[in-house]
Image: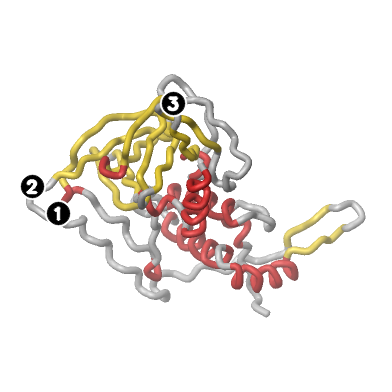
Amino acid sequence: MSAYFKDYYNILGIPNTASLSTIDIAYRRLALRYHPDLNHAAGATEKMQLVNEAYMVLRNPVKRAKYDQEYRLYIRPVNTSSHTYRREYVYQKSPSYSSSPVAPARPAPVPPREVHEEEPLVLFMLDGNIYAFNIYDVENIVWMQEIQVHPEAPEFIDGVITIRGNQTLPIIDLRRHLGLEKADPTRSTRVIILKLNGIRLGVVVDSIEKYTNFPARDIQAPPLLPYGMEIDFIRGVLYIGMQPIILFDVLGLLSTEEMASLRSFSLKL
């Protein structure tokens, strides 16, 4: 048995009974916090490396089952009569980059297909930060309305709304989906209706900032993390001065399992 142990559940900030959906939410939240393109503080890249490592193990049922066996040996009760538990583990010291595999170089900005090509974006606010979708991934933007709970909705779906009088649409609160702090709707709250491979999904955002065009050459691809790992739901990053604008990949917002669940649920509506 290894002399060192990494508590992956603690790294992601979740209980050891967490569902796959909870693991995904925790990962999205930490990726937005520690992604090297968004956080230039010392240690952010190393923290993101640990988050990716924890996610890759806990998201895989076989790897998680094997890890849980070791987890139960290291995290054990010391006073069962009072139901008090203590975690007994030692974090493995992360290797320095001088002795680790060399991290890939920062990718160059996404090359435009034409010299003067511009990409149309809709910018929106979420928890005080600016994000963006390509406008071609957006079908419509509507006012916030009451979300109706649906008994057959998957865990990551908050419910459904009805638009245009008779069209029922699954909806998610993008704050909750990304693991951000919950906020009550305001007069500025909007629902962005996305198109995901023929499936329509509404996402709740704090407000719409504006519609604008950016030169495609200004979109920087998210840098590869150590060992070639990537964050699928971030397509790129733009900067207005020092302000980063995170460009989401709509297909990367959902995991493969979530996408399958959404497709099945949409057929029932």
At 12% from the left and 47% from the top, the residue drawn is 117
Which residue is found at the position 40% from the left and 57% from the top? 231
Residue bearing the label numbered 3:
165
Residue plotted at (46% across, 37% down) = 169
Local packing at callout 2 (Cα closer than 10 Å; few below 14, some 14-19, many 20+) is few
Task: Determine crowd level at label 1: few under 14, some 14-19, many 20+ residues with C-alpha closer than 10 A.
Answer: some
Q: Disc 3 or 1, which lies upstream in sequence?
A: 1
The Cα–Cα distance between marks 2 and 3, rounded to whole angstroms, is 42 Å
Kindly state the secondary structure of the residue where label 2 is placed. Answer: loop
Identity, as a three-letter code, of the amino acid under mark 1: Pro
Check disc 3 and give the amino acid type: Gly
C-beta proximity under 8 Å, tags 2 and 3? no
| Residue 116: image tag | 2
- Secondary structure at badge 1 equals loop
On the rendered structure, is 218 left or right of 12?
Answer: left
Residue 78 pos. (x, y %): 84, 61
- Label placed on residue 112: 1
* Viewer-nearest residue: 139 or 167: 167
Q: Secondary structure at mark 3?
A: loop
Q: Are marks 2 and 1 in contact (CB under 8 Å)?
A: yes
State whether residue 43 is above or below residue 134: below
Inter-mark Cα distance, 2 to 1: 8 Å
Residue 252 % position (x, y):
40, 54
Q: Is residue 157 toward the left or the right of residue 196 in the image?
A: right
